[in-house]
Image (cartoon, rainbow, N blue to C red):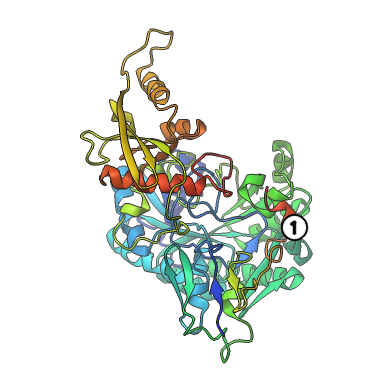
Amino acid sequence: MNIVPESGVGSASALVEEHPCYSAGAAHRYARLHLAVAPACNMQCRYCNRKFDCANESRPGVVSGVLSPEQAVQRAGEAMRRLPHLRVIGFAGPGDPLANRERVFATCKPLRLQFPELHLCLSTNGLCLPESVRDIVDHGIRHVTITLNTLDPEVGAAIYSWVFWKQRRRRGLEAARIVLEQQLAGLSALLAQGVLVKVNTVLIPGVNAEQVPAINRLVSAAGVFSHNVMPLISAPEHGTYYGVMGISGPSEEELHQVRSRCQGSAHLMTHCRQCRADAAGLLGEDRQAELRPVSLLGNRVIPIHRPKPALLAKAVLLAVATSTGERVDTHFGHAHSFRVYRVTGERIEYLEERRVPRYCQGDDRCEVTDDVLDNALQVLRDCQGVICARIGYTPWQALAERGIVPDNNHANRPVREALRQTALQLQENSGSRNCGLAAAC
Amino acid sequence: MALSITEECVACQACEPVCPNDAIRFKSGIMRIDKNACTECAGYHELPQCVEICPVEGAITNADGTPMNPPGTLTGIPRKKKSV
């Protein structure tokens, strides 16, 4: 059976040409949106450490917040309005989409009705793939990525810490054999259904480099569309096994060398940006911070922070972008001034209004937007955080780099409420969980 | 006889659907086990399912407060390295 028509909407050519991960050409033209409805996972890969509330790290498995299916559909609607070239909705984590089947498929149903022009896509470790193929096809998902890191269970035992399989946690060779068997069975079943399959292989130096050419041959012979050999992302602050144990990703040269040994018919993908599980926009263009935060998407919020301590110990200096001082109603970049407050426990003191000079200060650089950002950074330099209705990615990064935590979770909320919650949040995050990338983490 | 979830929980929600007693709910930032409903899976499974799927060391304890997945048993990261 083949579910793909030869031309028109959903045709084989549109499936490739409109999907940024399947076509390097599409990556420059078409946007994708990852909906983070899948927090759970059914196995532990040693290159992965999921983070559910991190705005800073740019890697798979990381999201700012988990969405309920209802929230995810709202976010898709907003993205449709704001990202004119949106073509693809992907389910990419932070856990494994097929370990969260109900949530993923409950999201697909309304999406297909409301946005039939969008392609639905998911990526999986493959563990639950064989029993999910029917549902995947029935829910209109025509692109599936499987992460296949080895064909040898001995090697797999060094990559996977454990899998949850048939009511128990399995480890070592047993775990690796189960994963491989499921991945290969799932791969065949998807291809038999005419689903466009991409295979991801994480290149882990010293672990699976010798496996990659064999994987490439196997998936090419099976009819996989594209093979993505991607470098291990590994840093101690990510908290992954490889990161903490000091096992680094490959050099450019190593990666190139391994890729050059992949000569099969599957397209070798080299434009992968290893996106977050809540990415939005063109590949490599992070626009998820521009979409409304989880806390504003309807009532069915799934809070992901730990319980808050009752009282704050020390004072926090916070700036707020607000026109009247009543509500957080101003975009960071549009703020002509910030109101600065000191928050100590339950006590909120208004200190002053600080104006942001809007014009060139007479130095050599006269690029207005840069100057406005520099001026804002200058007037906020002693603040621990800044609360605004919205904020672009560039200022977000600039603030985070200076240890000033941007917060856009309280758009249109009362200023005092936003101050209290943000101060609490800052105190929580300043504890032992600091990842070192930014004060917010 | 019931298990508990500690504040180590990251609320990945993996435990919720595998509980045969429907005893696990999301509440106040973490998952919680209803002590009256939890049987540690007695009568359903040989092993408590939340313990088997939980990815976080120390997040589930038994009635004595002993971690069911002690440090080092899930990530393979030695305990002293964890503070990195």
Name the side, left or right, on which A336 lies relative to A137.
left
The image quarter in which residue A285 lies: top left
Q: Residue furthest bottom?
A: B43
Identified at 71% across, 62% down, the residue is B72
**Residue A407, placed above or below residue A155:** above
- Report the front residue among A319 and A138: A319
- The reply to whether residue A252 is in sight is yes
Dot 1: chain letter: B
- Report the front residue among B41 and A170: B41
Residue A51 lies, in percent from the top left, at 53, 54
Identified at 49% across, 52% down, the residue is A277
**Residue A314, placed above or below residue A94:** above
Q: Which residue is mark 1?
A: B78
Secondary element type, mark 1 = loop
Residue A218 lies, in percent from the top left, at 69, 60
- Amino acid residing under circle 1: Pro
What is the crowding at mark 1: few (fewer than 14 residues within 10 Å), some, or many (at least 20)?
few
Name the side, left or right, on which A402 lies relative to A45.
left
**Residue A118, placed above or below residue A133:** above
Residue A440 lies, in percent from the top left, at 49, 43
Identified at 58% across, 71% down, the residue is B60
**Residue A130, placed above or below residue A238:** below
